[in-house]
Image (spheres, rainbow, N blue to C red):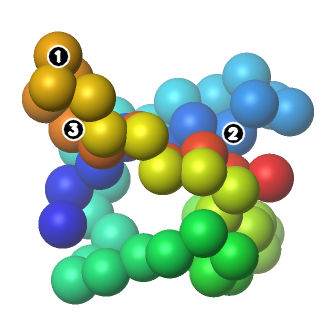
Amino acid sequence: MKCKLYIPKENKEIDNHTIGDSIRVGDYYPVENRDYTVTNILLDANQELPVVYLD
């Protein structure tokens, strides 16, 4: 599944990222050799891709 990753603490966005088949809030997800926790997943009808928030 393609999505946009957003890391608020670092004010960082990563577009068109492939995360695999599924992801849930509370899952751990590695990005650039660091582990993050999925805190929110936002899917809006006006967006092309879901936004996955990491903390």
The image quarter in which residue 45 lies:
top left
Q: Is residue 38 visible?
A: yes
Task: From this view, report whether residue 38 is shown above or below residue 4.
Answer: below
The image quarter in which residue 46 lies:
top left
Alpha carbons under labels 2 and 3: distance apart: 16 Å
Q: Which residue is mark 1?
A: 46
Image check: 47 left or right of 14? left
**Residue found farthest to the top:** 46
The image quarter in which residue 28 lies:
bottom right
The residue carrying pointer 2 sits among few (fewer than 14), some (14 to 19) or many (20 or more) residues within 10 Å by Cα, namely some
Q: Which residue is mark 3?
A: 49
Image check: 50 left or right of 12? left
Q: Which residue is mark 2?
A: 7
Q: Amino acid at mark 2?
A: Ile
Task: From this view, report whether residue 19 is shown above or below residue 43.
Answer: below
Q: Give residue 19's mark.
A: none
Alpha carbons under labels 3 and 1: distance apart: 9 Å
| Residue 19 locus on image (x, y percent) | 34, 70
The residue carrying pointer 3 sits among few (fewer than 14), some (14 to 19) or many (20 or more) residues within 10 Å by Cα, namely some
| Residue 12 locus on image (x, y percent) | 64, 29
Q: Amino acid at mark 1?
A: Asn
Residue at the image point whose x is 73% and y is 22% from the top: 11
Task: From this view, report whether residue 52 is shown above or below residue 32.
Answer: above
Check whether the beta carbons of the residues at disc 3 and disc 1 lie within 8 A of each other.
Answer: no
Q: Is residue 32 visible?
A: no
Q: Amino acid at mark 3?
A: Leu
Residue at the image point whose x is 75% and y is 30% from the top: 8
Label 1 element class: loop
Image check: 34 left or right of 38? right
In this view, the mark in front (2 or 3):
3
